[in-house]
Image (cartoon, rainbow, N blue to C red):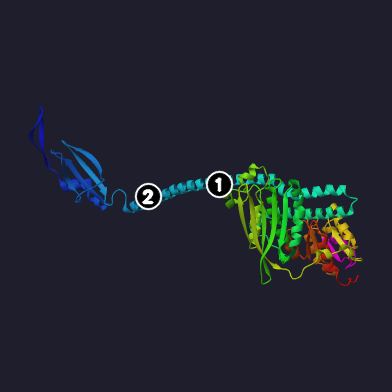
């Protein structure tokens, strides 16, 4: 092989001649062992740079183009040769490339998932933050409403309480006048009953909201309803010098209803009318019979006043909890803002309607429409006379842990001339029953919440006896006064449920029911 030789002549290169190199090419290739490169799965190429700057191939494996080669420069006389090699499949095998691609895709997916998880978590945190803020705001409003409720609730309780305190003072001053004293005692009893009903009414708000409140079916007398309500509101009417009138335009006086709830509805609306009517104003209660069909009567309970009234824009909110019209606030009339919402709920439960008409500084008119079945069997309360009842010889075991309640219970029972034994808790009750002969006691009056052993547990044990005592009538006499408490007591084996404070008439009815038979064998 030969190459041209140039010499420098100043700034130019002049051709001088050729250098001739005689090689044994086969020996040269054998010496370099380039033939083994292809066996080792390598492409190769030997080249040098010509005078024109282009690559001059000296030898190669025959592959047209090589990429990403490993290049080694070798100095030869008067020149430089370049030796390049590259694996057939490149420096990175295809399997590695595929694997790398898969790994890259997976990493990209994982990174994307991580990124979106971060984004979603931040969004959730933002949503949770808003929810927490909303809950905190609602809790704050609820606490404020609760504070207003506790602060203002005294008014609704004060209405019957004023009657109790007032008639108590009058009773103290008229003890020598038996007729007047009995009248005051009767009014005290009615006001106390209303107060108890009102307390239950407030406690039953949660039952109304949860849908657990059940309406009772009792025989009610509309004349008694108005009479009891008038007793409660009479002191307030006199105090404010109001002109109060009531009218019953009805033919059917006795109905099947929840007497307590019906009384609460009318009393609440009437109390509001009295409360928001200035001194010397007019208040009217009117009960009208609208229709009678298939033993069902439709009534309108109408309460009208000429008090401070309400603005028209407030009327759509009148049945919202804790809602109070601005004029009532400005007039400094106390109120909790819960009465009408509960009234509306009770009326809805009775499948009735309530409408309100009002004009500012003119007055308000409420119209409640309710339908009831008429009562075919009416009990004349005036004919009751507890003093004529005589259950002499009957043994009653009174189970009561509170000394005051026990004293009241004993005094009530003494009215019926029964023989009374007292146990202070369920465990003591069981011991007394085991000590006395079988069938000695004709009836057990059982409190529920007591230390050591409560009334429920004692009832279970009594019902498990293998003797006559297992059949003793057990009457729950407890402050647990809700319908669900009554059902629970009956499910555990009790026969009846009397709510404290015990009504002597209801107690008489229970004793009559279980003593109206032949005496047990002793």
Confirm whether residue 292 shows in the render.
yes
Mark 2 or mark 1: which comes first in sequence?
2
Residue at the disc numbered 2: 104
Residue 487, label in figure: none
Distance between mark 2 and mark 1 Cα atoms:
44 Å
When asked about the image quadrant of residue 371, the answer is bottom right
Helix, strand or loop for disc 1:
helix
Foreground: disc 2 or disc 1? 1
Pointer 2: residues within 10 angstroms few (<14), some, or many (20+)? Answer: few
Q: Is residue 402 visible?
A: no
| Quadrant location, the N terminus | top left
Residue ID for mark 1: 134
Front residue of 480 and 54: 480
Looking at the rendering, the stretch of residues picked out in magenta corresponds to: 429-445
Q: Is residue 432 magenta?
A: yes
Residue 136 falls in image quadrant: top right
* Residue positioned 16% across, 46% down in the render: 25
Q: Residue 32: where, in percent of width, then height? A: 22, 45
Question: Is 383 placed left or right of 210 in the picture?
Answer: right
State whether residue 24 is above or below residue 426: above
């Amino acid at each position: 092989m030969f190459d041209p030789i140039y010499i420098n002549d100043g700034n130019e290169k002049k051709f001088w001649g050729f250098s001739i190199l005689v090689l044994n090419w086969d020996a040269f290739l054998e010496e370099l062992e380039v033939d083994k490169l292809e066996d080792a799965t390598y492409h190769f190429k030997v080249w040098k740079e010509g005078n024109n700057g282009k690559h001059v191939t000296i030898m190669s494996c025959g592959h047209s183009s090589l990429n990403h080669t490993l290049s080694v420069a070798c100095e030869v006389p008067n020149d430089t040769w370049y030796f390049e090699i590259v694996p057939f499949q490149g420096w990175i095998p295809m399997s590695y490339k595929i694997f790398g691609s898969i790994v890259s895709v997976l990493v990209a997916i994982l990174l994307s998932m991580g990124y979106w998880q971060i984004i979603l978590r931040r969004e959730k945190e933002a949503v949770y933050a808003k929810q927490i803020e909303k809950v905190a705001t609602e809790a704050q409003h609820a606490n404020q409403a609760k504070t207003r409720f506790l602060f203002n609730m005294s008014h609704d309780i004060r209405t019957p309480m004023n009657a109790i305190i007032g008639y108590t003072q009058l009773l103290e001053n008229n003890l020598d006048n038996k007729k007047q004293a009995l009248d005051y005692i009767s009014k005290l009893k009615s006001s106390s009953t209303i107060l108890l009903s009102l307390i239950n009414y407030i406690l039953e708000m949660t039952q109304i909201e949860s849908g657990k409140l059940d309406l009772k079916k009792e025989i009610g007398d509309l004349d008694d309803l108005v009479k009891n309500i008038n007793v409660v509101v009479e002191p307030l009417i006199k105090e404010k010098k109001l002109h109060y009138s009531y009218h019953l335009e009805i033919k059917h006086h006795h109905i099947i209803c929840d007497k307590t709830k019906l009384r609460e509805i009318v009393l609440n609306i009437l109390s509001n009318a009295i409360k928001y009517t200035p001194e010397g104003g007019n208040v009217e209660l009117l009960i009208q019979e609208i229709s009678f069909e298939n033993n069902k009567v439709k009534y309108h309970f109408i309460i009208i006043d000429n008090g401070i009234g309400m603005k028209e824009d407030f009327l759509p909110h009148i049945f919202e909890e804790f809602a109070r019209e601005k004029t009532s606030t400005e007039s400094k009339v106390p109120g909790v803002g819960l009465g009408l919402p509960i009234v509306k709920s009770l009326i809805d439960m009775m499948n009735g309607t309530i409408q309100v008409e009002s004009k500012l500084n003119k007055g308000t008119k409420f119209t409640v429409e309710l339908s009831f079945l008429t009562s075919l069997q009416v009990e004349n309360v005036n004919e009751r006379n507890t003093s004529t009842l005589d259950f002499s010889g009957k043994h009653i075991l009174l189970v009561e842990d509170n000394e005051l309640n026990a004293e009241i219970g004993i005094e009530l029972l003494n009215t019926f001339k029964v023989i009374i034994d007292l146990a202070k808790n369920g465990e003591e009750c069981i011991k007394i029953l085991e000590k006395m002969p079988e069938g000695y006691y004709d009836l057990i009056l059982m409190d529920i919440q007591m230390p050591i052993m409560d009334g429920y547990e004692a009832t279970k044990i009594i019902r498990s006896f293998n003797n006559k005592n297992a059949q003793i009538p057990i009457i729950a006499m407890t402050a647990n006064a809700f319908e669900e408490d009554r059902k629970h007591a009956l499910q555990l084996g009790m026969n009846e449920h009397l709510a404290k404070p015990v009504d002597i008439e209801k107690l008489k009815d229970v004793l009559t029911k279980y003593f109206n038979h032949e005496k047990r064998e002793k």
